[in-house]
Image: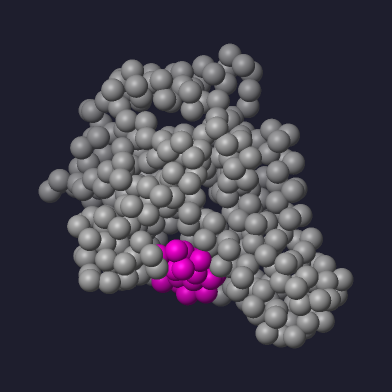
Amino acid sequence: MNTKNYRFSRLSDEGFTKTLRQRVNAYFKENNISRNANFNMVFKTIFMIALYFTPYFLIIFGVLEANWSVLLGWFIMAFGMSGIGLSVMHDANHGSYSKNKTVNNIISYIITFVGGNVPNWRIQHNVLHHTYTNVHGMDEDLDGPPFLRFSPHAKRRKIHKYQHIYAWFFYGMMTMSWSTAKEFIQAIGFKKKGLTDSKRTRNIIIGLVFWKIFYFSYALVLPLIFSPVSAWITVLGFLIMHFVCGLTLSAIFQSAHVMETSDYPLPNNEGELSTNWFVHQLHTTANFAQNNRILSWFVGGLNYQIEHHLFPDICHVHYRKISKIVKSTAEQFNLPYNAQATFIDALVAHTKMLKQLGRA
């Protein structure tokens, strides 16, 4: 369905939205704090980039010679790749890293070094996922392959009965799919949804071809040429990197939305959803492990997914502090603030939801 046919209610729960905005704005003003990156964010950017590229250069310069050391290098790169996606390019593509648009644009393009594409990400994630969270047919994060069912409104097949078991393997395939065919398919789909015209679609596809060649040339071809280990070790390492990264990213994002506490609202016949956008985010999103500062640091504050969805223009280093404001305001207006105590709890809850979706 074309995105122009969907709209949120402008009348419901206006008091919550106004109050929350005022309180969050007051927090930054009263404490004289920028909504953008701080020193911690800059340090994290350098750390994540180094975590990814240091093993890479050790591999192509032949410093790592033994098979096990090369595979370990690829394994470490997976966490650097995950950290870049979760903690660096994510904020930049939302425009929350810096007040300077040029800085945001430059940092956002680090996504091309991990196999992604800026225009695709901004449309799929910023526009579709953040605007129409958990809305079937619009939020592409719910559009898995036919053997995975992430929405109660999607067609159920017999194979879904076991998806809570096998889904984790396919989660590991996420970034490999993303870096090969998926973004080309997305580009065509964006045009059908009225998000791009023919000219922009063509430009996106041309850009995809260029950046995919660039990515596979440096990330796979150069290690195949220069690494002293056998080619099959290099290919295996490359696949391990993508699998670990894909599994990590999927576990973080799926535990925030495909949950028993999440709603999957549908618009009425006029295309209107029953709540305003702010309240919609509370009903479709969940936090986890808010007391785990190490996890929060690594995943770019995305364990505070509620705060991220409500204020994507605020850098994630501030989510922990403003979460107290969001929670108290939600409780004041008798609105949900869904959260799991630990990451393990969130993964268990997500697994139960997969099982429920597969058998309901």
Question: Among all residues in the image, which is located at the extreme top?
Answer: 30
Query: 360 or 107, which lies in front?
Result: 360
Locate residue 176, reporting x and y percent: 53, 71
Image side of residue 141 versus residue 159, left or right: right
Q: Quadrant of residue 329?
A: top left
Name the residue located 49 percent from the left edge and 69 percent from the top edge: 173
Would residue 132 be found to the left or right of residue 93 on screen?
left
For the N terminus, which image quadrant? bottom left
- At a point 77% along the width and 64% down the height, the residue shown is 55
Q: Is residue 209 above or below residue 244?
A: below
Q: Position of residue 211 (x, y in %)?
A: 61, 70
Instruction: Evaluate whether residue 92 shows in this view.
Output: no
The correct choice, above or below, for 112 with respect to 28 in the image is below
* Magenta-colored stretch includes residue 172: yes
Q: Main secondary structure of the magenta part?
A: helix
Question: How many numbered callouts?
Answer: 0
Residue 277 in which image quadrant? top left
Q: Residue at x 23, y 28 (%)?
A: 12
Instruction: Give the residues drawn in magenta, as a range.
Output: 167-185
The reply to whether residue 358 is visible in this rendering is: yes
| Between 334 and 12, the one nearer to me in the picture | 334
Residue at 36% of width from left, 24% of height from top?
330
Q: Is residue 83 left or right of residue 47?
A: left
Return the residue nearer the eye: 9 or 328.
Answer: 328
Q: Position of residue 29 (x, y in %)?
A: 57, 17
Magenta span contains residue 136: no
Along the horizontal axis of the image, is 40 left or right of 144?
right
Q: Is residue 223 above or below residue 129?
A: below
- Quarter of the figure with the C terminus: bottom left
Q: Residue furthest left?
A: 269
List x then y, in percent, for residue 63.
Answer: 87, 71
